[in-house]
């Protein structure tokens, strides 16, 4: 086992330049790769941990996970291996430290910069989630920074050492792994880590970027209790852009996972939209937290003073929290820098493990008496606390119970009176028509039942049941039914209502169509155009599409510009012995929401067959001979566009080759002393025409036939069906200084002695 290298020393092929960080698990160096002349980050495992199979498994998993991730904002792996018992991992080097250090020394980011940075981190999380990887430890110290130009920070998500992949779990059963200041409520309760927990952590990261501190601070059990019980923090109303930022924060940090953003991509888009609007309104340079905020900033230290406001305005420690002074609004003027923050308390920001499911007893007791009372909103009612609030609280409860009972009686009476006629919404024929449409219209793959019902109700509010019946959309008959006939205007109204009932239709449609990055759709396709596309392709039959026709054409043009590439098919030819391998690159996945069909035929043949898979092997007569195949492709996209190609793909097999293979070593001591090996060889060949015999000529010293015992000048080739195999086993003299050369049509091989 090697000792940890020092500055200027070499580890493997890397030259150590300086230590970037050191912890309980190993050391991270800045190193130089002399071969590629670039800086790298080199992580070495502590020798004491190399015997810990669980840790090495986790370290190896980090390397494997990084190797499969492809994202512009995730640190890329370069190499993983072992040198004399020391396990190491090499990744790209990111030069400007981590976000934790940046916030600690320079204070909160300008608002737009914070939104853009966390948006990039959210995109990285989305890329990880798409391949089944949950990070589990998103926090400032795991976000590396590159200051591309002054004020422009490019983040790189790192440290996937405790990430989960699929159903894998290298952590002890019953353990919770992560950093408490950035851990979601359900994970504090011991639930399994999910992508939603990463989204929550990204919301905490946003709060830290805006204010210079984590959303909640305090001791371990105070942190756990705050994440579970305390209200989601809000920026003061006086903060520039608070009306845009607070809804994002509230949703990202929702206590219930189902109330958060569905995907990290949705969060990224919300952040980008808010940043765009702030820039348009001239508030892009606002700083939410300034010198005062930074002075009290805490990016996750434990224990420490907490000023996180609970429902009644007190901190978890019982201290009255400052009002707006804790988060003053500062707008930077031209020429001014970010205010220098006061020194912070020691910041551990470390990854911790606590075992067991649920809170410790102390924390559970704190839940029962937390200021602001109340159980977490996502716990069932039997978890609620009783006996809080004193006499005033008891009176309020009694009044609430009496008032609720009266309201229930009134509503019960109203329900009996209005049964069949509806209340607060549609009634009578309108309600029945909406129900018939919602249950009859074919549901797009991206829509939910609730969204279909919402769209149907929206339609009937615009076009009453009687009109829809006269238009032929519904038929009363014995019961209200959907006919499947749509006038263009009604179809457009329904489609617009469906999009209006969908919170983020571009994301939901794009995910269903598998277009990958949905930002182009969101930017280029407006709601009216998409409604026209839905109306024409999903609702209308033959006939005049009315205004839906031009709207649909506009949507198709925009979608084609986003996702239909100039070349729907790419083919790469790899030479192989006696055949060429053709690998096809079809738009993945095949086509957004549609399908791709590839048909192939040998050049000159009119008989095409459909390609199964993405690889085709074309046999050729001999190595070095060119072969071609004719390729037809048809790619159909979800919005109706089809792209056809017709081309030839040509290439050559590997050249014919002869090769001498040594079979044994000499055991005679006489020859061993002379360092001369016995000379038994096998001559192998590749790329000769299968089944066709050829001759191999063996010459000595450039022209004469071999005069070795039992040797011949000419040997017959033994071509097998694959054009590859052994030609002859041959033994030369034991002591010799000659050169023996085997030749065959188009190939030769020499034994150098």
Image (cartoon, rainbow, N blue to C red):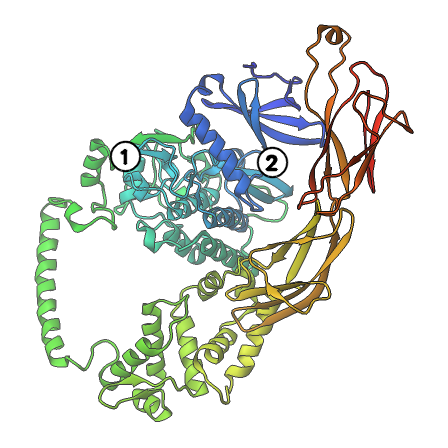
Q: Position of residue 703 (x, y in %)?
A: 92, 29
- Residue 703 position (above or below residue 144): above
What numbered label is drawn on residue 317?
1
Q: Give the mark, 1 or 2, whose residue is nearer the N terminus.
A: 2
Image-based side of 176 in relation to 614, left or right: left
User: Residue at left 56%, top 27%?
Assistant: 81
Q: Residue at x 51, y 87 (%)?
A: 546
Viewer-nearest residue: 286 or 506: 506
Is residue 141 positioned above or below 575 on the image? above
Percent across and percent down for residue 2 are 56, 14
Residue at image position (49%, 36%) is: 142
Mark 2 highlights which residue?
Answer: 94
Q: Position of residue 375 (x, y in %)?
A: 21, 46
Mark 1–mark 2 distance (CA, rounded to whole Å): 39 Å
Please give left or right for residue 507 compared with residue 220 in the image: right
Secondary structure of residue under mark 2: loop
Which image quarter is the N terminus in? top right
Q: Position of residue 579 (x, y in %)?
A: 69, 49
Can residue 341 be seen here? The reply is no
Find numbered disc 1 in the image and state the secondary structure of the residue it sits on: loop
In the foreground, 718 or 702: 718
Badge nearest the viewer, 1 or 2: 2
């Amino acid at each position: 086992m090697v000792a940890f290298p020092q500055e200027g020393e070499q580890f493997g092929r890397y030259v150590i330049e300086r230590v970037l960080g050191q912890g309980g698990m190993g050391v991270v160096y800045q190193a130089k790769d002399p071969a590629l002349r670039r800086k790298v980050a080199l992580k070495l495992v502590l020798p004491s941990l190399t015997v810990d199979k669980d840790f090495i498994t986790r370290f190896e998993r980090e390397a494997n996970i990084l190797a499969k991730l492809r994202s512009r904002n995730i640190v890329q792996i370069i190499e993983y291996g072992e040198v004399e018992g020391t396990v190491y991992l090499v990744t790209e080097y990111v030069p400007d430290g981590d976000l934790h250090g940046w916030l600690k020394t320079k204070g909160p980011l300008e608002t737009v910069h914070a939104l853009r940075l966390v948006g990039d981190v959210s995109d990285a999380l989305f890329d990880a989630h798409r391949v089944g990887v949950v990070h589990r430890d998103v926090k400032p110290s795991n976000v590396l920074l590159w200051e591309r130009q002054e004020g422009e920070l490019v983040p790189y998500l790192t440290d996937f050492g405790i990430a989960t992949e699929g159903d894998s779990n290298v952590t002890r059963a019953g353990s919770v792994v992560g950093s408490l200041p950035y851990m979601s409520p359900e994970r504090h309760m011991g639930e399994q880590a999910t992508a939603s927990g990463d989204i929550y952590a990204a919301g905490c990261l946003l709060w830290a970027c805006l204010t210079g501190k984590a959303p909640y601070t305090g001791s371990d059990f105070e942190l756990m209790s705050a994440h579970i019980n305390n209200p989601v923090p809000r920026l003061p109303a006086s903060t520039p852009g608070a009306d845009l930022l607070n809804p994002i924060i509230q949703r990202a940090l929702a206590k219930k996972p189902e109330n958060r953003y569905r995907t990290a991509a949705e969060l990224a888009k919300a952040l980008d939209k808010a940043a765009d609007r702030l820039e348009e309104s001239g508030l892009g340079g606002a700083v939410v937290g300034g010198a005062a905020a930074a002075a009290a900033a805490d990016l996750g230290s434990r224990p420490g003073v907490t000023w996180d406001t609970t429902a009644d305005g007190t901190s978890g420690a019982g201290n009255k929290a400052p009002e707006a002074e804790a988060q003053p609004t500062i707008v930077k003027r031209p020429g001014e820098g970010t205010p220098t923050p006061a020194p912070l308390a020691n910041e551990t920001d470390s990854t911790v493990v606590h075992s067991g499911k649920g809170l410790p007893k102390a924390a559970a007791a704190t839940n029962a008496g937390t200021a602001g009372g109340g159980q977490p909103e996502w716990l069932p009612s039997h978890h609620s606390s009783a006996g809080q609030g004193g006499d005033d609280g008891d009176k309020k409860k009694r009044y609430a119970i009496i008032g609720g009972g009266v309201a229930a009686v009134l509503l019960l009476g109203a329900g009996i009176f209005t049964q069949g006629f509806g209340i607060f919404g549609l009634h009578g024929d309108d309600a029945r028509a909406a129900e018939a449409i919602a249950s009859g219209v074919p549901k797009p793959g991206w829509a939910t039942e609730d969204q279909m019902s919402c769209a149907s109700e929206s339609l009937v509010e615009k076009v009453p049941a009687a009109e829809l019946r006269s238009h032929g959309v519904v038929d009363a008959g014995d019961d209200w039914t959907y006919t499947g006939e749509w006038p263009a205007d009604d179809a457009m109204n329904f489609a617009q209502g469906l999009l209006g009932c969908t919170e983020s239709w571009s994301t939901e449609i794009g995910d269903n169509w598998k277009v990958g990055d949905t930002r182009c759709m969101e930017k280029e396709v407006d709601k009216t155009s998409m409604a026209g596309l839905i109306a024409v392709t999903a609702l209308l039959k033959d006939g005049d599409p009315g205004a839906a026709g031009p709207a649909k054409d506009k949507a198709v043009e925009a979608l084609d510009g986003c996702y239909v590439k100039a070349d729907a098919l790419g083919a790469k030819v790899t030479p192989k012995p006696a055949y060429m391998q053709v690998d096809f690159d079809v738009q993945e996945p095949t086509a957004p929401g549609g399908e791709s069909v590839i048909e192939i035929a040998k050049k000159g043949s009119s008989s095409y067959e459909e390609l199964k898979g993405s690889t085709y092997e074309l046999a050729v007569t001999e190595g070095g001979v060119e072969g071609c195949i004719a390729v037809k492709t048809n790619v159909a996209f979800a919005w109706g566009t089809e792209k056809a190609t017709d081309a030839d793909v040509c290439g050559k097999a590997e050249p014919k080759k002869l090769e001498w293979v040594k079979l044994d070593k000499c055991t005679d001591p006489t020859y061993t002393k002379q360092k001369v090996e016995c000379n038994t060889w096998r001559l192998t060949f590749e790329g000769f025409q299968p089944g066709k015999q050829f001759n191999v000529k063996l010459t000595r010293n450039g022209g004469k036939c071999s005069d070795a015992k039992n040797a011949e000048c000419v040997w017959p080739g033994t071509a097998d069906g694959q054009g590859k195999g052994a030609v002859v086993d041959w033994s030369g003299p034991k002591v010799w200084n000659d050169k023996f050369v085997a030749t065959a049509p188009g190939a030769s091989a020499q034994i150098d002695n």
